[in-house]
Image (cartoon, rainbow, N blue to C red):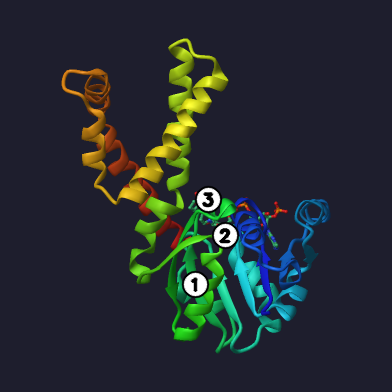
Amino acid sequence: MTKTAILGAGAMGESVLAGLIRAGRPLDSLLVGEKREARARELTEKHGIEVVDNVAAAQQADTLVVAVKPQDVASVLGEVASSLRAGQVVISLAAGVTIATLEGLVPEGVVVIRVMPNTPALVGEGMSVMSPGSAATAADLAAAEQLLSACGRVLTLPEKQIDAVTAISGSGPAYVFLVAEALIEAGVHLGLARDVATELAVQTLHGSATMLRETGTHPALLREQVTSPGGTTAAALAQLEQHRLRSAFVEATAAARDRSVELAGS
Ligand SMILES: NC(=O)C1=CN([C@@H]2O[C@H](COP(=O)(O)OP(=O)(O)OC[C@H]3O[C@@H](n4cnc5c(N)ncnc54)[C@H](OP(=O)(O)O)[C@@H]3O)[C@@H](O)[C@H]2O)C=CC1
Ligand SMILES: O=C(O)[C@@H]1CCC=N1
């Protein structure tokens, strides 16, 4: 089996790592590049994974998943560049780091694929969008898709859409977790015990997402089914409309998209 190394096992890198392990990827086909001793020990204890330095990871792996902060991508790829060889695949998860920048940081012939994942990869329910670099073949893309599909769903889109993708699915889990938090707090405000409010909110989010996925019905129709004329839901939705929830999402995602564009220039 080919070897995959994850350089930078923070929130996103560890989510991908855990997703791959959960999907049954053999531990000896995975490596992590991590410079901090204590974190390396923690990752080995938690996942049973071999942790090495970035250069050793680059030498041993066929595919490198770069999951460091956008501002650290250049230094990490600079560190491993002389160990990279033609045909090796570099998958960058970094927001705002363009394919052109990535290709300028690796030797010619190294395949670059830019990916925007999200943290539900941890439980095999991630959403990843891939944009192929100029040297990527159909076989490289198929292999990357196979790797990422262990962590959830995968789409391939042109790079020009990646900033918008980042705003919707990359950052998206944070919006959903914020909604969960808000619903739980609202339940507590209404007098429910916190654990009860949490169970109600989490199962309602899970059930609603499953219903969207399994029925394929438009969310507006599903919302109408909940909204009895003159009832409780109509009263609540009127408040959410008055507080401009829809335009808050339009403005929030535009801000995320703009920040992704801005990161490309930094
Ligand atoms: N978090 C998310 O939901 C998403 C993140 N991303 C992208 O993933 C990337 C990582 O983000 P996130 O996980 O949130 O950030 P974190 O800060 O949680 O993770 C970055 C990791 O990189 C490690 N690191 C830093 N320098 C090096 C190095 N030289 N060699 C090896 N490891 C190094 C850090 O280790 P240490 O702590 O020891 O410094 C840390 O574990 C970003 O580029 C982000 O844009 C993309 C989609 C979603
Ligand atoms: O907040 C960020 O910049 C990263 C990219 C998408 C989600 N988290």
Task: In the displayed orientation, state which residue is furthest to the front.
Answer: 215
Q: Which residue is mark 1?
A: 145
Place residue 206 in its image quadrant: top left
Identify which amino acid the numbered label 1 is placed on: Glu
The answer to whether residue 110 is left or right of residue 266 is right
Whole-angstrom CA distance, mark 3 to mark 1, is 17 Å
Residue at disc 2, CB closer than 8 Å to ligand 1: no
Of the pair 82 and 241, the residue shown nearer to us: 241
Question: In the picture, which quadrant includes the N terminus?
Answer: bottom right
Numbered badge on residue 43: none
Which residue is depicted at the point 60% across and 89% down?
Answer: 86
Of the pair 248 and 234, the residue shown nearer to us: 234
Which element carries disc 2, helix, strand or loop? helix
Q: Which residue is mark 3?
A: 120
Identify which amino acid the numbered label 2 is placed on: Gln
Q: Point out the tag, 1 or 2, that comes first from the N-terminus.
A: 2
Residue 185 horizontal/vertical position (percent) = 48, 21
The answer to whether residue 97 is left or right of residue 208 is right
Q: Point out the tag, 3 or 1, that comes first from the N-terminus.
A: 3
Residue 264 horizontal/vertical position (percent) = 44, 63
Of the pair 215 and 205, the residue shown nearer to us: 215
Which residue is depicted at the point 49% across and 15% down?
Answer: 188
Q: Is 134 placed above or below 173 here?
A: below
Of the pair 103 and 39, the residue shown nearer to us: 39
